[in-house]
């Protein structure tokens, strides 16, 4: 054991180095997870604001279309104006659908960043089935 002292000290130093490396790796993973959650929260907030604005645009486009149709029915407006307001309403509704899709995709990203799992119910079912079989 007298001659093994250097080897034992080297093994302890190597174990300490591995532990520090793993601790740094864990800290980096935690910081990455926090960054992903913060990014997802910010994206959700911005898309929620955008959704509110686009909803307002759709409402205004629908009102403008109704007004132009009413004016056309009374003979005050031309058909081109009616068609233009209809086109603008359709564009606003298309924009609304795109923002809604982005919003729900961002919600999914947030769910996953917080550690959510799509297969949780399936795992619970398999675990329960295994318990019954045992």
Image: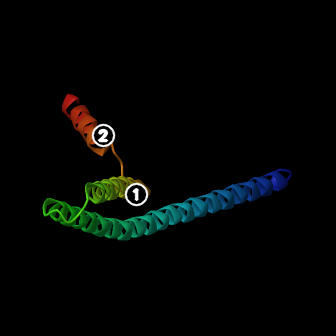
Asked if the residue at tag 1 contacts the one at tag 2, i.e. Cβ–Cβ closer than 8 Å, the answer is no
Which residue is pictured at 30% across the width and 40% down the height? 123
The image quadrant of residue 15 is bottom right
Residue 51's label in the rendered image is none
Q: Is residue 77 left or right of residue 1?
A: left
Give the residue pinned by disc 1. Answer: 106
Q: Which residue is mark 2?
A: 123
* Label 2: how many Cα within 10 Å (few below 14, some 14–19, many 20+): few
Cα separation between marks 2 and 1 = 25 Å
Q: Along the horizontal axis of the image, is 10 left or right of 112?
A: right
Residue 107 appears at what percent x and percent y? 36, 58
Above/below status of 121 relative to 100:
above
Residue that sits furthest to the right in the current view: 3
Identify the residue at image location x=76%, y=59%.
13
Q: Residue at x 13, y 64 (%)?
A: 74
- Residue at horizontal 33 percent and vertical 45 percent from the top: 118
In this rendering, the label closer to the viewer, 2 or 1: 1
Tell me residue 62's x, y (percent). Answer: 23, 62
Front residue (pair 129, 11): 129
Farthest-out residue, front: 75
**Nearest the eye: 42 or 62:** 62
Q: Quadrant of residue 106?
A: bottom left
Figure check: 101 above or below 45? above
**Above/below status of 124 relative to 44:** above
Q: Residues within 10 Å of mark 1 (few under 14, many from 20)?
A: many
* Disc 2 element: helix
Q: Is residue 36 left or right of residue 57?
A: right
């Amino acid at each position: 054991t007298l001659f093994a002292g250097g080897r034992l000290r080297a093994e302890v130093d190597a174990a300490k180095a591995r532990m520090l490396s793993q601790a740094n790796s864990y800290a980096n993973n935690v910081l990455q997870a926090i960054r992903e959650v913060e990014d997802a929260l910010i994206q959700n907030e911005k898309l929620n604001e955008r959704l509110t604005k686009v909803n307002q645009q759709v409402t205004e486009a629908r009102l403008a279309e109704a007004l132009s149709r009413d004016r056309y029915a009374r003979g005050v407006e031309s058909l081109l104006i009616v068609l233009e307001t209809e086109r603008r309403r359709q564009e606003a509704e298309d924009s609304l659908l795109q923002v809604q899709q982005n919003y729900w995709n961002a919600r999914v990203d947030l769910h996953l960043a917080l550690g959510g799992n799509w297969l949780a119910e399936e795992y619970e079912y398999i675990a329960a089935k295994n318990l019954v079989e045992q």
